[in-house]
Each structure stands twice: as C-alpha cells, then as structure tokens.
Image (cartoon, helix red, strand yellow):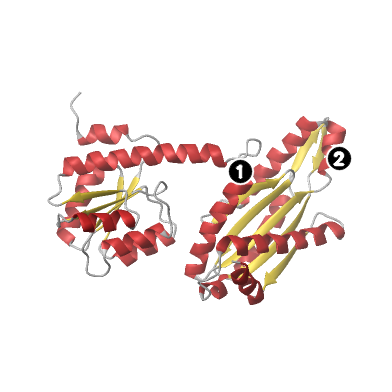
C-alpha cells in the first residue's frame, strides 16, 4: 500500500486527535496547518501566550509543534511553561528551528521537548514524526485509563484523583477561581451488605458512582472513589456563590437515588461535606504546594461530612476556607 498522508491519518487510533501549531509567522503557520490537517483537527496560534491561555481554559490537544524563535516568547520558554502544566507523556511537544546548533537542541530537550526538527521542514517527515507521537500518546492514555480507574465504580481511584485534583488546583490558581472539595459517605452502607449481601452493596456503589459522575461532568471537575463507601469530588467555579449553586444542584440529584433490593424500592442517602477555597487567595501565593493544600481541604470536608452524620445523615454541610489554610499549606510544603 502506498504511504500517503491519508493513510497516516487512518493509522492514528481512537478519537480525532487535536494538534496545536504555535508560530508567529502567518505564512509558515498556515502552511503547517494545511500539512497537518490529514492527521486530525489543528488549532493554531501566532502568540505563544494565547496558546497557553487556550491550554489553561481546558483546550484539549494531543500534540504541539512550535517554532524555536518567536518574538513574543522563545520556544524554549514556551515549552517550559507547557511542562509546568503537562508532563512529557501526556502532551508531546515538537520544536523546530532554522539553526543547526546542538546546544540549542539540548536546550529544547532540557525544557521538556519530545522531538526537534531542523528547517527547512520536510512535511512528509513532519507528518511521520507527529504520527509516532500521537500513537505513543494514545497508548499512554489507554494505559493511564486502566491504571487510574477503580474497578467497581469506574471512577478515578484515590491516587489518580489526587493527581488530577493537583492539576486542577494549579489551573484554578492561575485563573483565580474558587475550588470546592466534596466528600460523600453512603449512609448505613454496612446495612446493605449485611442484609442483602455484598453483591447488593456493589450495586449501591455503582449506582451512587453513576449519579455522582453525572453531577461532576463539566470541565474543571474531577470525581473519584475515595475508600470503601466514600467518594470524593472537586469542582472549580469563578466564585464561591457558583460553587454553592453547584452544591444545590447536587443536593437535588442525590435526593433521587433509588435502588430495588429484594423487590423493594429503597432510597440511598448520602452524608456530604464540602470545603470551599477562594483560589484568588492562592493565586497570589505561588509557593503553595497544591497536593498539601488539597489534603487539608479533604480534612476540612471530612469534618463537615461528619457534622452531616452527627446531625442525622442525608444532608450537606459546607465551609468556606479562609486564607489561613493556604498559609498553613505553604508552611507544610
């Protein structure tokens, strides 16, 4: 079979990949965009800062190709800033340059580039290189998906949740958003296991997971199974009021969780705790370590959840966290 650009595109499995082109020369950028179209959807930016803003706004891309020499930002600096957001495996970056300089190439790889290509660019070679990176990323994504999922609920496991939550923390801090950390505990879960058997308990877990997943399906939201009959979620919103509004919608959603056990329709209730952090505070505290702060938010949400339990279960309690927690997080880091 003849190897063509169309055949290359056919080899890239899964959903249509998205490739980002960052180049400040309009003519070169247009040419690159046209050459890469057979491989998937192409988004292009003349200003590297605009490209970073796109990534911060949850623009999902599968590979980046960027020029080394640009007026607004050097390609190495752009690559460094992308790597602060995404690791090498998650988002491959190819840098190209008209300078045949091994030292410059080393700088590119040290900054986190996956590949380096010299000008003049052979577009067929470029397509080949991008194809390999897309295939590697697809394999990485599949492996990550398998490793990060809880087998019963199909939500993120605890480790994966913390990893994704830390990434969302960084994004929310850059944008000055608020962050709500939710903990859920299934009320009287032991009763379901003891009375109806562990398979019935598994059905309860799956049903609760399905309901919560639907409630945390927006960009900037993460949902996971925390431990046993406990679930954890994170949501980012522009203001504390918008976090409260989301919590109100969540309360309505969990009111309608019903399951048939031994032919009897039974309502499943949850005790919920919420810790809300104004990320405009964290935005000015660049020294704050995301994972440490998230762990402290979990502690605060856990306290609110137990207030819900002590007060009779089947309710939500929340707390707006002040700047002191952020400062404590910075000290713990």
Q: Tell me the tag on residue 187.
A: none
The x, y position of residue 176, in whole percent, is 51, 71
> Which badge, 2 or 1, comes first in the chain's sequence?
1
**Residue 246 can be seen, yes or no:** no
The x, y position of residue 324, in whole percent, is 66, 76
Q: Is residue 24 left or right of residue 258?
A: left
Please give the name of the residue rendered at 34% of the width and 41% of the height, measured from the top-left corner.
134
**Residue 302 can be seen, yes or no:** yes
Q: Tell me the tag on residue 191.
A: 2
Front residue of 248 and 45: 45
Task: Identify the residue at the far top of this view.
Answer: 1
Q: Which quadrant, please, contains the C terminus?
A: bottom right
Disc 2 vs disc 1: Cβ atoms closer than 8 Å? no
The x, y position of residue 248, in whole percent, is 68, 61
Q: Is residue 200 left or right of residue 70?
A: right
Q: Quadrant of residue 203?
A: top right
**Which residue is label 1 attached to?**
155
Q: Is residue 11 left or right of residue 90?
A: left
Front residue of 33 and 96: 96
Circle 2 SS class: helix
Q: CA distance from mark 2 to mark 1?
A: 23 Å
Circle 1 SS class: loop
């Amino acid at each position: 079979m003849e190897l063509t650009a169309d055949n290359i595109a056919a080899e890239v499995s899964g959903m249509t990949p998205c490739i980002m082109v960052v180049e400040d020369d309009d003519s070169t950028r247009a040419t690159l965009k046209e050459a890469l179209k057979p491989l998937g959807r192409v988004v292009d930016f003349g200003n590297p800062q605009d490209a970073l803003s796109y990534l911060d706004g949850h623009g999902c891309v599968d590979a980046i190709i960027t020029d080394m020499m640009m007026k607004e930002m050097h390609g190495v600096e752009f690559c460094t800033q992308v790597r602060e957001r995404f690791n090498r495996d998650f988002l491959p970056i190819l840098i190209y340059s008209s300078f045949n300089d091994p030292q410059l190439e080393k700088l590119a790889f040290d900054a986190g580039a996956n590949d380096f290509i010299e000008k003049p660019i052979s577009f067929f070679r470029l397509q080949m290189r991008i194809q390999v990176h897309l295939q590697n990323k697809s394999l990485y994504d599949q492996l990550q998906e398998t490793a990060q999922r809880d087998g019963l609920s199909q939500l993120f496991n605890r480790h994966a949740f913390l990893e994704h939550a830390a990434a969302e923390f960084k994004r929310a801090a850059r944008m000055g958003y608020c962050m709500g950390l939710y903990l859920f505990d299934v009320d009287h879960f032991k009763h379901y296991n003891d009375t109806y058997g562990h398979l019935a308990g598994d059905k309860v877990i799956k049903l609760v997971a399905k309901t919560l997943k639907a409630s945390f399906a927006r960009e900037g939201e993460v949902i996971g199974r925390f431990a046993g009959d406990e679930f954890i979620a994170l949501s980012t919103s522009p203001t504390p009021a918008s976090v409260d509004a989301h919590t109100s919608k969540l309360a309505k959603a969990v009111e309608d969780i019903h399951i048939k056990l031994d032919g009897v329709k039974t309502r499943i209730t949850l005790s919920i705790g919420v810790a809300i952090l104004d990320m405009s505070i964290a935005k000015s505290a660049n020294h704050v370590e995301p994972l440490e702060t998230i762990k402290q938010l979990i502690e605060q949400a856990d306290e609110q959840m137990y207030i819900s339990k002590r007060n009779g279960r089947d309710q939500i309690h929340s707390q707006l966290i002040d700047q002191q927690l952020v400062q404590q997080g910075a000290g713990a880091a």
